[in-house]
Amino acid sequence: MRRVLQWAMRALTAFDWPLLTLLVLLAGLGMTVMHSAAGGTDWRFAEQLRNFTLAFAALWAVALIPPAWMRNLALPAYLGGVVLLLGVEFLGETTKGATRWLNLGVVRLQPSEFMKIAVPMMLAWLFHQRQGRLRVLDFLAAVLLLLIPFLLIVKQPDLGTALLVFAAGFCVLYFGGLSFRLLAPAALLAALGIGSLIYFEPQICQSNVDWPLLHDYQKHRVCTLLDPASDPLGKGFHTIQAMIAVGSGGIYGKGYLAGTQSHLDFVPERTTDFIFAVFAEEFGLYGGVMLLALYALIILRGLAIAMYAQTLYERLLAGALSMMFFVYVFVNVGMVTGMLPVVGVPLPLMSYGGTALLTLGVASGMLMNISRHRVAPS
Amino acid sequence: VFEFKQTKRRQQRRIALRASIAGVFVLAAFGLLGWRLWQLQVQRYEGLAARAEHNRIAVVPIAPRRGEIFDRMGNALARNERDYTLTVVPAQAGDPQALLDALGELVDLSPAARRRFGRNLEQSGRYTPVLLRNNLSELEAARFAVQSWRFPGVELNARWVRRYPYGESAAHVLGYVGRISEQDMDALEARDETGNYRGTPVIGKQGLEKTWEAALHGRTGLTEVEVTASGRPVRTLRRIEPEPGKNLTLSLDIALQQVAEAQFAGKRGALVAIAPRTGEVLALVSAPSFDPNLFIDGIDVDNWKLLNDSPDHPLINRPLASAYPIGSTYKPFVALAALELGKRDPAQRIADPGYFELANQRFRNAGGVAYGPTDMHRAIVMSSDTYFYSLGVELGVDALHDFSQQFGFGQITGIDLEGERRGVLPSTAWKRQAYKTPQQQRWYAGESVSVAVGQGYNAFTLLQLAQATAVLANGGTYLPPHLVREIEDPRSGQVQSAAAQPAHVIALQPRNLQVIREAMADVLVKGTARRAFEDAPYQAAGKTGTAQVYSLRGARYRAQDVDERLRDHALFIAYAPVDDPQIAVAVLVENAGWGAQQAAPIARTVLDAWLAPAPPADDATPTTPAALAQASAQTAP
């Protein structure tokens, strides 16, 4: 009896309560917006509820496992993931023009989703093993370990997931001590490149200008981003409509369930990738800023967990997973507000979809697990 | 321990520093997003809110008119027809049952149509138009139009639908259009073409409709309409006209095509006719065929099962997508290879006791006949296998491969129609690649024997065989085969010709060509196909073939003992007239037996139809170029 009680206590104290509170708040908000975006409590609403339940179960389970497991699982998880990705490459099922699924008879897997967690685990493990005697060669090995799954996923093609996997791995490199002398020039170069692209847009998007290295359609995609009006029937249409939805929300929003853009079918993919447009239209600038603040708190909490984690492995993993959250939010909101190109990245805990939720559940569970075994802040 | 602790503290400090920097970065990036929200929701609020609330700009695509397809005489093979439909926007239409009852008095609404409408209604959004009826008659459309004010949210639309007036005729050439599927959509997305297909419900799925999709589709136009919040149009702001799709004129002659198709009634097989001087495809038959009109609005389950499960595989485009052994029709090319490579003198006589022996293995003549001493001419005319068995060994498979390749055997011909297969032109290199174990990879001399009579590993498409015949007729000049002759812009009337340029010219000795031509001409006069070409009003050259589908391992072949699907394929190639080739044709009838009996008569009918058409009863206008030439020759003094 006592042991049962003890076990129950342990199971209940597995959570990092600040983080859990924030996540639950966000999930509640997500279901509220889903109710509006799906136009009622239809099957999508019900399925999303089920997805949340599953994700929560995963979170709880991962939070409870011994920390050593998380570390020992890194190498098998990574190797298994790469093998599955290779399996997709050669034996994968092609749906919707992209080969992302692997049918194992019993279950259908999407290994690329799994790599969002396995890649930071692997890199963190590498740095953990080599701590104290880390050399340049180790960084090169880490870059290689990151590029293999990244390129395999790009080839599927699934740019959104590839981007997230890359970001997660890159964050481990960053927290692992990638020199600022390397980081700063790279960041500067990127900023300059993007700046000049925006500045010279009218010239380089003329139809008679050929771009080196890029296909015509890729050029088209970039130019559509810079000037959505140039393709009002295709991709530009989505961006324009989403921007109108966000903008017309104004400061206070049009009110819950009253977004005309969303409810008159003008916002594309409004339950999945573009759900932020529905939210911003109905809740306005206030709602948008509150939502961003909620996300920021979650990310900052994750970074705090990283700071006080016990081992190097846990520090790196917690940092990378927190930053993955950030990349999700930034890319998605940037896309909906017309700042970034349209790539398939969902908004965490808001967009409809079971796979992404499960990944986020596991990631949050890891953060909680790490938080439970942290050192006392000194 | 101390050092470890120190490292650990240093590590912790580093993480703290880096995590702090990351935190600041996150806040800065979110600040950027917040600034963007402020920009959209505060600075640009008025403009964007106005667009959303009062003066919403609806971008309405205007679908282009799909190009039509004509045969060489201008007969429409694929055209657009007007079709009236009724659609309902649920949000504006009110109670569906009352609506259906009221509408049912004006137009015919079958119970099935009502059920389908009910189903679609449940599955679509409140503002998406749902199809209620298509194929309204003119009368029904007019009756509704007069009363339309009674039915808000119900719209009468006119659309263009694709029709194939010749039905099953040339179905594999034309292919069909069908509803844009998810896969099509993804393919369009990959090319960033989704915008160009807004407002277009169909896309080319098979045949020329698919291969020439880009030209046939055109470019979608658009109007920007100001609409009120309830969706009522106020005024048009901007209009970009659509660019209609291009019209295609084919080299195919539908009359010739139908003559050829009639010959295949109740049979399985293929026929390709090519004009050797131009590379134009005049007829391309795949039997049995199907009716492409079934696919336009989505094929129903019963018809699909019937077509897809049929053991005759009517959906396969046989001349392009099936590779066959071609039997003795290969012999003229093998003989020409021997002459060109100097391996055999045409006058040299080979003893033919009815079989050829190699390393104690006997290769028999088909039918077991012995032809005695045989020179090249006789070997082709009587189709002696023994003569070519020995030639196969002397030539060697690689030399034969290099020679035959120039005629297009085992190569993609590059015809402007999708679905072409490459087949197999065997060589030692090919075998090394195609097989795994060293034993299988080895080339055996015995295999060269059967390759020389068009059996063994040889597998060619009928298009390749027809093309090779055309190249032979054309003296070695290879013109890529093509179906589309002219591309017309319907707006400007500008016509672009799609004439083929010679891809390459095979260096052939005229005197060697002469040997082959004379022998092939004699095949039709005193050889294997003499009966089929009795009293032909032109001089033709040809070769029969009977291709083994099933190896009997030395046992004697008796058609009645073998399962029908394993019986020999009947083949025939021909071109005519010999001194000025107008048409080259290759025929294959699956599992029909002797080429001379089953395939040669079909070729004869097709050559007759092209070169000496039966004079039309009341209309004296000749319809083929050859007949035109003849007619002008007759009127000349």
Image (tube, coloured by chain):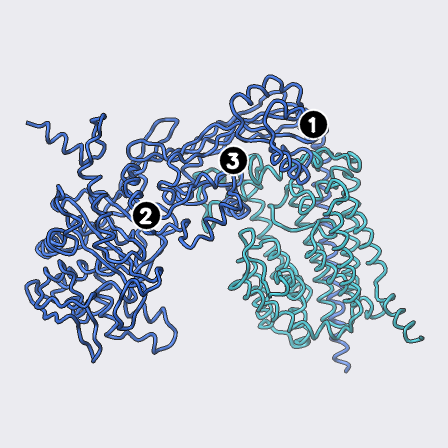
Front: mark 2 or 1: 1
The x and y percentages for residue A333 are 69, 46
* Colour applied to chain A: cyan
Residue holding disc 1: B92
- Looking at the rendered structure, the secondary structure element under dot 1 is helix
Q: Are marks 2 and 1 in contact (CB under 8 Å)?
A: no
Instruction: Relative to A75, say whether B50 is above or below.
Output: above
Residue holding disc 3: B200
Residue holding disc 2: B415
Q: Quadrant of the C terminus of chain A?
A: bottom right
Query: Is residue B562 something one can see in this rendering?
Result: yes
Instruction: Give the amino acid at mark 1.
Output: Gln
| Chain shown in blue | B
* Mark 2–mark 1 distance (CA, rounded to whole Å): 51 Å
* Mark 3–mark 2 distance (CA, rounded to whole Å): 28 Å
Q: Earlier in the sequence, mark 3 or mark 2?
A: 3
Specify the quadrant of the image occupied by residue B154.
top right
- Looking at the rendered structure, the secondary structure element under dot 3 is loop
Instruction: Relative to B357, say whether A162 is above or below.
Output: above
The x and y percentages for residue B233 are 63, 23
- Which residue sits furthest bottom? B1
Q: Earlier in the sequence, mark 2 or mark 1?
A: 1
Using the image as rendered, state which of residue B426 and residue B232 is in the foreground: B426
State left or right for residue B41 relative to residue B423: right
